[in-house]
Amino acid sequence: MTLDRKLSNTTQADLLSAFRLFDGDKDNRVNAGEVLALIESFGGQKDCPQVQNLVRACEQNKDGSLDLEEFLQQWRIFCRSNMADEEPEEEILEAFRGYDLDQDGFITRDEMVEVLKRMGTIRNSELEAEKCIQEMDLDKDGKVSFVEFLIKWRVS
């Protein structure tokens, strides 16, 4: 598989973003420890099927880690819904777009505030938006990408 090929609904930028999120030591390889560390960093479920599939793929590879191409193959599996009660990636993307008001590929704190205000059920939408962004912003850049949203959705 090449990077030129589209995997599911995820863009090339999203795929590279996912790889970079998981590649904690920036050695261009993702190992089981890095997968578990990322999931643990935001309180995700390390025993969920998607996480365990990534961990197994790392452990079963000859050097205990995945390069970019190998990771992308596993990412496709991660994105797919493999349980009857899970939403397919397309539905998660639709949910993401509901928060990404300017459709730039990121959810900002201001967008989150606006969506929460529209819901009308949150007392302090500013505080709740801040909490949501902090929980989902895995790379701590102040905004939530689709990849971060998807990871959080799948493992929480």
Image (tube, rainbow, N blue to C red):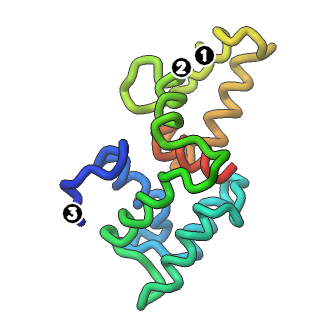
Q: Quadrant of the N terminus?
A: bottom left
Tell me the amino acid under the disc marked 2: Glu
Measure the alpha-carbon separation of dots 1 and 3: 37 Å
User: In the drawing, does residue 6 fall left or right of residue 153?
Assistant: left
The residue lying furthest to the bottom in this view is: 62
Q: Which residue is mark 1?
A: 115
Pick the residue in front: 130 or 55.
55
Q: How many marks?
A: 3
Label 1, residues with CA under 10 Å away: few <14, some 14-19, many ≥20: some
Which of label 2 and label 1 is nearer to you?
1
Q: Are marks 1 and 3 in contact (CB under 8 Å)?
A: no
> Is disc 2 surrounded by few (<14), some (14 to 19) or many (20+) residues within 10 Å?
some
State left or right for residue 13 relative to residue 110: left
Q: Is residue 32 above or below residue 98?
A: below
Nearer to us of marks 3 and 2 is 3
Is residue 150 depicted above or below 60 in this figure?
above
Circle 3 sits in a helix, a strand or a loop, which is it?
Answer: loop
The image shows residue 141 at horizontal and vertical percentages of 49, 42
Whole-number angstrom distance, CA of label 3 to CA of label 2? 34 Å
Query: x, y (%) of residue 53?
Result: 56, 70
Q: Earlier in the sequence, mark 1 or mark 3?
A: 3
Residue labelled with disc 2: 111
Which image quadrant for residue 116? top right
Q: Is residue 51 left or right of residue 106?
A: right
Tell me which amino acid carries mark 1.
Val
Q: Which residue is mark 3?
A: 2
Badge 3 crowding class, 10 Å Cα cut-off, few under 14, some 14 to 19, many 20 or more, is: few
Residues tagged 2 and 1 counted as in contact (Cβ below 8 A): yes
Residue at 71% x, 58% y: name it: 45
